[in-house]
Image (cartoon, rainbow, N blue to C red):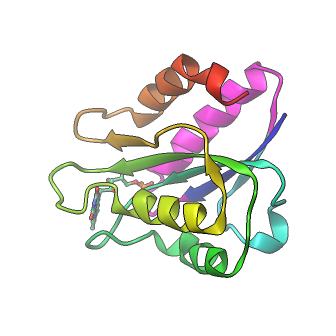
Amino acid sequence: MHFEIIVGSVLGASEYVADAVEQFLNDKNHTCQIHLNPSLVEIPQDKRWIIICSTHGAGELPENIQAFAGELDNIKLSNKCLIIGLGDISYDTFCQGSITMQEKLESSGSQIMLPPLHIDVLNHPVPEEYAIEWLNDNFSAIE
Ligand SMILES: Cc1cc2nc3c(=O)[nH]c(=O)nc-3n(C[C@H](O)[C@H](O)[C@H](O)COP(=O)(O)O)c2cc1C
């Protein structure tokens, strides 16, 4: 199976999670493409997508994923996706960036395979470890 890994990140933590997810999936004989500057032109819409996205500002999306998020407003999807959000529980807008992506994907018709994972980076200082644990525990639901 092939996964498109779509990253929204400012400081790089979500990129580390994306690298770990890619490694995990490769070890299970799946292929992945990581998109650090995501654009619909380059991302096949019939593949499974994994969105890995932090939150910045006051509940805002990282700048690198904002244009892509806008593109989702104008398309119909029928693929499956997974969402991993990174955030800091001390904000009222905890993981709002990934929630925004979830809402856009659901409105586009994409099927969210599992309830999204929201990683509080205060409690999980190595977020990629927590993400892989979650993926491993739930893997049967996404294959
Ligand atoms: C200026 C700033 C604003 C932030 N705002 C939020 C926020 O509104 N909600 C939230 O859950 N986390 C917020 N965070 C926490 C980040 O989402 C968290 O540190 C995350 O791990 C960053 O991931 P990244 O390195 O992939 O960008 C903020 C962090 C910074 C530095």
Q: Is residue 43 left or right of residue 10?
A: right
* Residue 47 position in % (x across, y down): 81, 49
Q: Quadrant of the N terminus?
A: top right
Question: Residue sitting at 53 percent across and 42 percent down?
Answer: 16
* Residue 121 position in % (x across, y down): 30, 42
Magenta segment main secondary structure: helix
Q: Is residue 127 magenta?
A: no
Q: Is residue 22 magenta?
A: yes
* Residue 40 position in % (x across, y down): 76, 71
Question: Residue sitting at 43 percent across and 49 percent down?
Answer: 85
Q: Which residues are magenta?
A: 8-31
* Residue 143 position in % (x across, y down): 73, 27
In the image, residue 69 above or below residue 116: below
In the image, residue 14 above or below residue 107: above
Question: Residue sitting at 56 percent across and 70 percent down?
Answer: 65
Q: Is residue 62 left or right of residue 59?
A: right
Q: Is residue 51 left or right of residue 10?
A: right
Of the four image quadrants, the one with ligand 1 is bottom left
| Residue 92, picture quadrant | bottom left
